[in-house]
Amino acid sequence: MSAALAPALHGLTILERGWLSSNNVLLHGDDSRAWLVDSSHVLHGAQTVALLRQALRGATLAGIVNTHLHSDHCGGNAAVQRAFGCTVTVPPGQWAAVQDWDEQALSYRPTGQRCERFVADACLRPGQSLEVGGRRWQALAAPGHDPHSIVLFDDREGVLISADALWENGFGVVFPELEGEGAFDDVAQVLDLIESLDARWVIPGHGAPFSDAPGALQRARRRLDGFRTNPRRHSRHAIKVLVKYHLLEVQQQPWVDFLAWFTEVDLCRVIWHSLGRPDGTMPAFAERLVGELMAIGVLSRRDALLINA
Ligand SMILES: [Zn+2]
């Protein structure tokens, strides 16, 4: 059954956005007060506000709940706050970092990504619930991709908002692993937790909603096994994700500016070192990575480096 027709998804508007911007899930309330799960990337702020205005159909937006604070999930918080005057609820582990706007702890500096500062009003702790439109969304801890991430589960309808913990084909980069903090076990435990929920529908952070959770779990576990067996494969995958995401942010960039970004971003340096400094220098490594991304059609290089939309 398509997601649009599924009774379990009634009362939800799922705005599927892409890779630079996470999906947005609008939870419609009985009392004309809706809640938004995740707000996309800062560059798409105006589009997010326009899509929300249309989807709200005159209802009030009470608040945003962020599953985690990566730039593709909360970059629109500030624009949405300005447009609708709503509150923002964040996972508890990053409350202090938001208050201080600590771009190191919030990952924007080490990843070389952009996010507009916003104000957080409350936390949703694992075990707590958000009640909207007759549904009770329980927050569950989902470390791995991000140590502070939560996912939201509506037990009665069997709907899981899985953020980047589970996609139809895989899961998000396991960022703590890149800095030497083991987190593959966390990913495995979260996949076990998701399996135990017996979800009938999964609304991922990226990609369309899907109903075959067992199939997705099987693919995710296979992928995780591959990374565990060969962590270098995960690191190489991660650095390509960082490069691709950066090009999605800037769309195109002169090669010298791209190299300046690549060689200055902490996480790129950390990964290059952890891989044993392949190609001798970071610029040479960048050449090779970009060549590999061009070979699969993700990037092009003419006067500048371009992302192929
Ligand atoms: Zn993420």
Image (cartoon, rainbow, N blue to C red):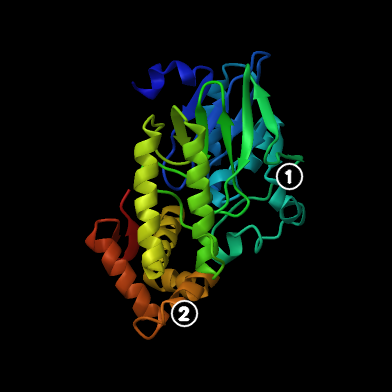
Mark nearer the viewer, 2 or 1: 2
Q: Is residue 266 above or below residue 26?
A: below
CA separation, marks 2 and 1?
A: 36 Å
Quick one: 80 or 223, which is closer to the camera?
Answer: 223
For residue 291, the mark is none
Q: Is residue 178 above or below residue 197?
A: below
Mark 2 or mark 1, earlier in chain: 1
x then y, percent, for residue 22: 49, 42
Quick one: 17 or 3, which is closer to the camera?
Answer: 3
Residue ID for mark 2: 273
User: Which residue occupies 44% across, 28% down?
Assistant: 201
* Amino acid type, residue under disc 2 in the picture: His
Residue ID for mark 1: 119
Using residue 78 as the reference point, say whether residue 279 is left or right of it. Answer: left
Decide if ligand 1 comes within 8 Å of the CB at mark 1.
no
x then y, percent, for residue 242: 44, 61
Decide if ligand 1 comes within 8 Å of the CB at mark 2.
no
Q: Is residue 85 above or below residue 254?
A: above
Dot 1 alpha-carbon crowd within 10 angstroms: few under 14, some 14 to 19, many 20 or more: some
Q: Quadrant of residue 285?
A: bottom left
